[in-house]
Image: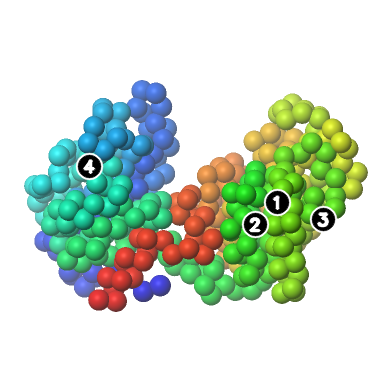
Amino acid sequence: MNVLRFSDLVAQGKASGQRVFIRADLNVPQDDDGRITEDTRIRASVPCIEMALKAGAAVMVTSHLGRPTEGAFQPADSLAPVAARLSELLGREVPLVQDWVDGVQVAPGSVVLLENCRVNKGEKKNDPALARKMAALCDIYVNDAFGTAHRAEGTTYGIAEYAAVACAGPLLAAEIDAITQALAAPKRPLVAIVAGSKVSTKLTILKALSAKVDQLIVGGGIANTFMLAAGLPIGKSLAEPDLVDEARAVIEAMRARGAAVPIPTDVVTAKAFKADAEASVKQAQDVAEDDLILDIGPDTAAQLAAQLKAAGTIVWNGPVGVFEFPAFSHGTETIARAIADSEAFSIAGGGDTLAAIAQYGIEKDVGYISTGGGAFLEILEGKTLPAFEILQKRAAG
């Protein structure tokens, strides 16, 4: 994917003294008192900001936070907690600037945080007048917010159309490189794990991947629907019987290419969806009418782990069982540790997947952990993300 990279501009000395506008993703969770409860996205945004400061640029950073109403700023919408955390991480004061669209004062070698961009009227609908005003604030626009790359908004698309220079920051560039390595030119075999509660929410992803991957591992409620498609009983487990034909179509599409969708041979069941429910390991064909399937069984987990250890590339989206309940976490842990032990290039994304990675402490053993939920899923669907599209257009001249 051909995009201009901010790191290249810096290396060429083209950022010194320039006004640099960075669209970051600083949308972090907060408690009821407005305190940040998890700051991964802020920490991930620091390298781009430091790169610009070290280059001697006048740096402006903005992000959305939550779901504010355009034109109606509320204290809860403020990036003030983010400014405080950024100040700590950068070791310098980061002033927070309100009402910034018509002009910003910032000196070379300094940084300011521009208040919640989604409060500006026209941001979500990518209003050209707003985009032109924002573009006029800078010499270089840097998109470093993969988490919003699937949205064509003022600060993710419009400003990139009109800015003198538009480029990808290091975080966005790393996402592009990882996605290209995993999907555009993968080392084979390419194995994808797609898990979740419903086939309907991942059907387009399953169809897109069925044309590319060598093994398509399904988990969670999705696997239950595939078990139905294979003629297996699932008791009262979560599934979508009306999508059995769609599941069969995915299985057949894979089979026609000499690829496969492994169907669980054993499962872990319970009579109730509770953390303290008694867990029973059963052969897939022995699931009772009043059983809930809450995890894959040890034989299935071992078979899948062997496939993952032999893979060339692994794409992981979703835990394969109710890993939040200890009795039903073994399948996901086995999968996670197999990915960690594999020599394959692995890319993982999605909130539950990141939670599982953190739970099992394998962050350093996954090739790339994607910072974007919705954007990551749209990439798996084969969509071109708006933020990528405009940066490619600008790079092409």
Residue type, mark 3 in image: Ala
Sequence-wise, the earlier of marks 3 and 1 is 3
Residue type, mark 4 in image: Asn
Question: In the visual, does 341 lie left or right of 116?
Answer: right
Q: Residues within 10 Å of mark 1 (few under 14, many from 20)?
A: some
Q: Which residue is mark 1?
A: 243
Q: Are marks 4 and 3 in contact (CB under 8 Å)?
A: no
Residue type, mark 1 in image: Leu
Q: Which residue is mark 2?
A: 193
Distance from disc 3 to disc 1, alpha carbons, whole Å, reads: 13 Å
Quadrant position of residue 72:
top left
The residue lying toward the viewer, choosing from 154 and 171, is: 154
Q: Which residue is mark 4?
A: 120
Seen at 52% across and 55% down, the residue is 377
Expressed as whole percent of the image width and height from the top left, the position of residue 307 reads 73, 63
Seen at 34% across and 44% down, the residue is 26
